[in-house]
Image (cartoon, helix red, strand yellow):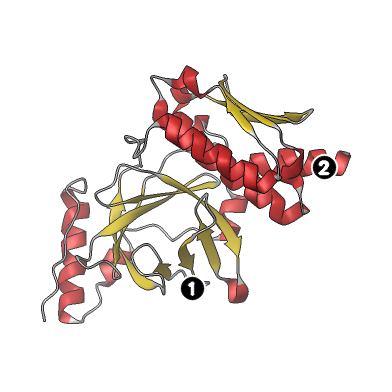
Amino acid sequence: MVKEFHVPAAISGASRVAALALIAAMATGFAAPAIAQDTQAAPTFASTRAAKPSAPQQGGTWYVDMGSDKNTGFVLEQRGSMVLLKVDGSDNVLSLMPVPGQRGDTFFMDYAGRMVLRVTQQGNVVSYIHNVSGSPAEPSAKAPPITPGAMTASLDKMRASAATELTKLAGHEVTIWGTQSFASDEAWAADALNILVLGVKNANGLAGKAASKVEKVTIRRGKAPKVGFKDGELIVDVNPDDGWSGRVTPEAITNALTQSRNAG
């Protein structure tokens, strides 16, 4: 049996040579120690908490996902306190929430609460993208910084989906306003919706029913990313003109709700 390995076209030069070298080593059963020096350590719960939100872009690491039939992979990048993931062949970019696990492991969840990756204390990565039981993902080469891509669904559909998720969490109807002002930056508004749901879901886990206080969400353009909560309205400011540093984080959403709950 011979398995096919594919290197994304986006990876070029020395990184592509390194990826091909790893694939050749995997096919023959030998390790390629030089590759590890060309990749970055997988993010962990500790590294995301210690990082500054506005850390400069350094790119990520391309991983071969052993759970994929064609052995394609994904790019994993820690951008300050955020962790981004982009699967080969998809323009969708996920922001992942790190959750501490047993034995020093870190579980990375998507906005819907599904487990996407597990990073062990030793830095090994297990992917649940193609295999619900988990499959090893091997670091292959450095990758350029992840950039926003086209959306996989219409903005209005994503807004409706996010409102439905928030309504379930809150126990009453929650409305979302402001997405129409992002007609030229739909991917940014969609990304903010994903982060919004993830942050509210995490707040519910930490403080019981923090989401029950949310009645309305407003997403708007701002000079800097910011989250505020007052009188039942959650206000999320994002700045599409400021690159990835113009995004809010799930932690900011969670903090706005839990701090408000504690203050009340």
62 or 197: nearer the viewer: 197
Q: CA distance from mark 1 to mark 2?
A: 37 Å
Say left or right for 49 vs 21: right
211 or 34: nearer the viewer: 211
| Rendering quarter of residue 58 | top left
Say left or right for 253 vs 144: right
- Element at label 2: helix
Say left or right for 142 vs 54: left
- Element at label 1: loop
56 or 263: nearer the viewer: 263
Q: Residue furthest left?
A: 2
Residue 261: mark: 2
| Residue 218 rendering spot, x and y as whole percentages | 62, 25
In the displayed structure, 111 sits above or below 26; it is above
Q: Residue at x 39, y 57 (%)?
A: 40
Q: Residue at x 43, y 35 (%)?
A: 157
**Badge 1 local density, few (<14 within 10 Å), some, or many (20+)?**
few
In the displayed structure, 235 sits above or below 132; it is above
In the displayed structure, 32 sits above or below 245; it is below
Q: Quadrant of the N terminus?
A: bottom left
Amino acid bearing label 1: Gln
* Residue under label 1: 122
